[in-house]
Amino acid sequence: MDLYLIIEAISVLLNLVFLFLLIKRSRMCWPFGIVGSAMGVFLFVAPGAAVKLYSEAILYSYYIWIGIFGWYQWSDKESLATIKTWSTKENVLALLVGFIAFPILGFVMERFFDSNSPYLDALTTTFSFIASYMQAKRVLTSWHFWIVINAISIYLYLSRGLNLYAGLMAVYFVFSIYGLYQWKKTLFKTS
């Protein structure tokens, strides 16, 4: 069996465990996400894999750090139950930052690297940075971001031959809808 396929499969499995535990608001989600993300970084830049999704490698490196941040943020058991909402202004600001940053990152990846799908890769990467931060802070609208990001990522990964990752994004898409529902249910129980 191909080494890259094995790495992809293990990374997908770890990230599925991460998602399941995230929806349950279990602090244990973060170690699974950290290790799964580290394997993804390797896969996206490995010379023999020919994937060349450098923005995704940057994103998955960020997932490692946001995993550490999330682990720290979720250390208080009482805060695990707290789901937060952002004001319209905060959500619009998050969108604005994403729509300003992604073309810049896309340009850099197109101009200075041999990146495949530089702008689409930059779009999903930029908004994933934002959504991951929101998730670590337990912001409900993070799930809205993930629903859109995961739908776009299915196409991106299929276009690069990462079929297991595309399948993971399809599962993430469905579970993002479920996560939104679960977090909304928790929010309304506590308010």
Image (cartoon, helix red, strand yellow):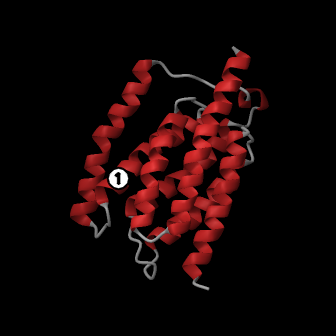
Q: Residue at x 63, y 38 (%)?
A: 179
- x, y percentage for residue 57? 45, 62
- The answer to whether any part of residue 58 appears in the image is no
Q: Residue furthest right?
A: 77
Classify 10 Å Cα crowding around label 1: few (below 14), some (14-19), many (20 and above). Answer: many
Q: Residue at x 30, y 59 (%)?
A: 118
Side of 65 where 56 appears, left or right = left
Q: What residue type is disc 1 on?
A: Ala
- x, y percentage for residue 6? 62, 76
Residue 157: which quarter of the image?
bottom left
- x, y percentage for residue 36? 62, 61
Q: Which residue is mark 1?
A: 122
Q: Residue furthest bottom?
A: 1
Quadrant of the image containing the N terminus? bottom right
Q: Is residue 102 above or below residue 188?
A: below
Side of 3 where 147 appears, left or right = left
Q: Residue at x 53, y 63 (%)?
A: 165
Q: Is residue 22 above or below residue 87?
A: below
Quadrant of the image containing the C terminus? top right
